[in-house]
Amino acid sequence: MAASRQSKAFHRREQQTREERVRRLTFLGVGGGLALVGVIVVAGLVWGVWLPPREHVLTVGSRSFNAGQVADHATFLVRTGNTNAAGDPQVAMDDLVQREVMFQAGAAEVDEVTEADIRAEISERLGMAEDATDDQYGKALGDYLLASGISRAEMESVFRYLVIDQRLRDQLKADVPESGDQMDVLRVATNDRARAEALRQAALNGEDLRDAAVAAGIYTDRTQAEAGWFSPETLPERVRDQINALSVGGVSDVLDDANQVGFEVYAITSRTATDPYQEAVRDQLATLRFGEYVEAKREELGVTEDLSDSERTWILDQVRRATRN
């Protein structure tokens, strides 16, 4: 009997030991899992808030940018006046693309940019006198670096880009022919379709569209209806065909405006294909050619964008933090 009681007691202790071991293992497993979750959460916070994502979100030719670099560039743009970059990372990415197009392609089209060229560009952009001393230049430079939050090397890269950009634009403008098809365009806009129809009818009856707009109370000055000179190429695409089809003195139909909330009427007062281009038209054509050049080089270099929603949110958060004050 004694042996039997001892055996039962032994088995009870063994069972209790096994149960205790299971409880300890369960506790350690739960505790270890919670600890691991804690490590993952902290790591995620560090990675997602303080450390910039490492993945490339933009590649232009031979150059790639991660989300941190896009955030830095967006911050620079906001600090130097482009507030649109605060609400959309695409603004910074588009600017980076154009800069890389200038560095990787445009630079080969123009004269080499020297240190003297960069200094002259900086001086002009900062409104410094041509005879500014080195001390005055250094102070203006320091103030700009402080306000923009970039390094001197980054700043010189910015101004090198501006020099290349302007030289290429000037070169393309110089290549514009001396003359070509151009027209002097009138435009009157109103939110009232009935007034637009009445205005068009007045012009069809022989009244000058400018005077009709003033008489109808749409404008207070007839010059407000003068849109200026355009070539067929540089007319806004949405109304190009309608305006280009007009003869001198002709009046367009009532057209929807760009926002589809108002109405427009167009007329042409003069058109020539032999007179020298108006300066405004030369500028328009140069801008058009520049845009075509950039688009062609984008295709040639190859541009890849891969910005996730989380990276977009992270970039916007970084820009807000950096520009809060």
Image: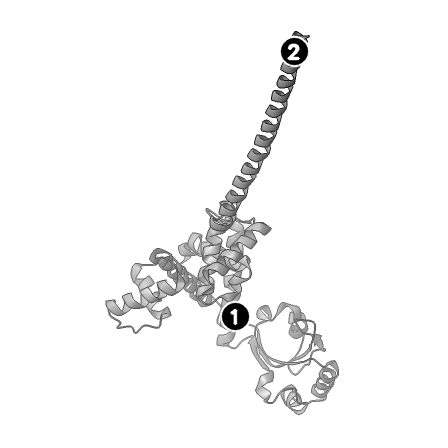
List x then y, in percent, for residue 274.
54, 76
List x then y, in percent, for residue 111.
36, 59
Which residue appears farthest toward the front when viewing the image? 2
Residue 299: give its label.
none
Q: How is the image coloured?
A: one colour
For residue 120, say whether it is visible: no
List x then y, in percent, for residue 201.
73, 86
- Callout 1 crowding tier (Cα within 10 Å): few <14, some 14–19, many ≥20: some
- Callout 2 crowding tier (Cα within 10 Å): few <14, some 14–19, many ≥20: few
> Residue at the location (34% across, 58% down)?
152
Question: Label 2, on which residue?
Answer: 7
List x then y, in percent, for residue 149.
39, 60
Mark with earlier residue (2, 1): 2
Q: Is residue 92 above or below residue 226?
A: above
- Dot 1: what SS? helix
Q: Is residue 259 above or below residue 65?
A: below
Query: Where, by quadrant of the figure, is residue 23 drawn?
Result: top right
Q: Amino acid at mark 2?
A: Ser
The one nearer the camera, 276 or 290, is: 290
Q: Is residue 215 above or below residue 152?
A: below
For residue 292, say whether it is visible: yes
> Residue at the location (69% across, 8% down)?
1
Question: Label 1, on which residue?
Answer: 284
Q: Which of pointers 2 and 1 indicates the residue nearer the eye?
A: 2
Which residue appears farthest toward the bottom when viewing the image? 215
Q: Mark 2 to mark 1: distance in Å?
A: 104 Å
Give left or right: position of 90 versus 139.
right
- Dot 2: what SS? helix
The one nearer the camera, 123 or 30, is: 30
Give left or right: position of 132 versus 62.
left
